[in-house]
Amino acid sequence: MTAEDKANEKKEKEDNKAAAEKKDILKKDKRDVVVHPIVLLAVVDHYNRAAVNTTKRVVGTLLGEVDDYKLHVTNSFAVPFEEDPRDPQVWFLDHNFHENMYAMFKKVNAKERVVGWYSTGPKIKSSDLSIHELYRRYCPEPVLVVMDVQPKGLELPMEAYYSVQEQTSDEVFKRTFLHATSTVGAFEAEEVGVEHLLRDIKNASASTLAVRVGDKISALKGLAVRLREISAYLSSVVAGKLPMNQEIIYYLQEIFNLLPDQDSDELVRSFAMETNDMMLALYVGSMLRSTVALHNLINNKIKNKKGKEEKKDAKDKKKEAEEKKEGEEKKDGESKKSGEEKKGKDKDK
């Protein structure tokens, strides 16, 4: 590779990075969404009360605040909602109920304000933009959180969206949804409550090691799903089915750049040392488990042997006592008989 090629490659990387940074600046006002556990529980409870075993979806209002440059969704409440299954554009949302409920929530916690709304879609529907416009009366930039109350995979059961101005085929609403980063977070007090709830769900008989191994297996399965999605996307781009997105390619390149150099002697040595240490710990653990099992077996045999001996001694003592008692009874019977014979002889005389 010549110096000119290297310079061109370097310039292309810098241009891609600058484009990604520019896009980040444009999206800076679209904050990351952090959904708290109480909101997830409230949404599932709302669905189970109103739409379980049906094809309906439920809608409600999200309350929260901005903290650490992130939008924390800390509370929610249900809102009466109906829609025509044959015509998604025909829907009804009781905004009077919403305003009354928000006024009561505001008396309890003035920090919480309306930040958006939720839907149990489980996907975005055509009428969601109209509902989103209604919520723009109460919040300049509302967020839509679509919840999947019956998740089948290992992914988070929610997606967050903002609406942005964009030319669309709709002449009334010239806006479209933009995906936002969403995570599940909790304050310290909420974590304690969640731990208490999980005690009824988790298997109490499972050891800590088994739980950790299960968590790692779930994480690896989730990673495998995401890698398959990346592979499918790249294959579609190569086949010309999808246009190439510079931002996605830039992030993929970042991932590959963060991968360690597997040909490095230091890395190989570090992995070997880590593996040897782990195998040594497993070997020592196996030896200790075998020793403890053997010790328990010996103690059990000694205990059983001692129990048998005590049982035998008790049986022998009981037998001796019975023989002694029989001997005494026999002796008493003989003495009584001899006394009667003597008495009979005296009478004859």
Image (cartoon, grey):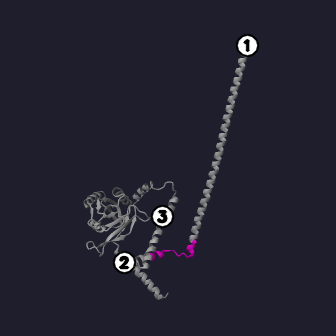
Quadrant housing residue 99: bottom left
Q: Provide the major secondary structure of the magenta segment.
A: helix
Circle 2 residue: 22
275 vs 197, left or right, is right
Q: Secondary structure at mark 2?
A: helix
Q: Position of residue 147 (x, y in %)?
A: 37, 63
* 263 within the magenta span: yes
> CA–CA distance between discs 2 and 3?
36 Å
Circle 3 residue: 218
Please give the range of residues in magenta: 252-269
At 65% from the left and 50% from the top, the residue drawn is: 298
* 264 within the magenta span: yes
Relative vertical location of residue 319 with respect to residue 268 in this rendering, above or below: above
Q: Position of residue 89 (x, y in %)?
A: 28, 67
Q: Secondary structure at mark 1?
A: helix
Quadrant housing residue 69: bottom left
At 31% from the left and 59% from the top, the residue drawn is: 78
| Nearest to the observer: residue 252 or residue 57 | 57
Q: Position of residue 27 (x, y in %)?
A: 35, 73
**Identity of the amino acid at label 3?**
Ser
Mark 3: few, some, or many residues within 10 Å (few <14, many ≥20)? few
Quadrant containing the C terminus is: top right
Residue 319 seen in this snapshot: yes
Q: Residue furthest front?
A: 86
Which badge, 2 or 1, is on the more N-terminal residue?
2
Total tally of numbered discs in the picture: 3
Quadrant housing residue 17: bottom left
256 vs 284, left or right, is left
Circle 1 residue: 346
**Identity of the amino acid at label 2?**
Lys
**Identity of the amino acid at label 1?**
Asp
| Nearest to the observer: residue 166 or residue 170 | 170
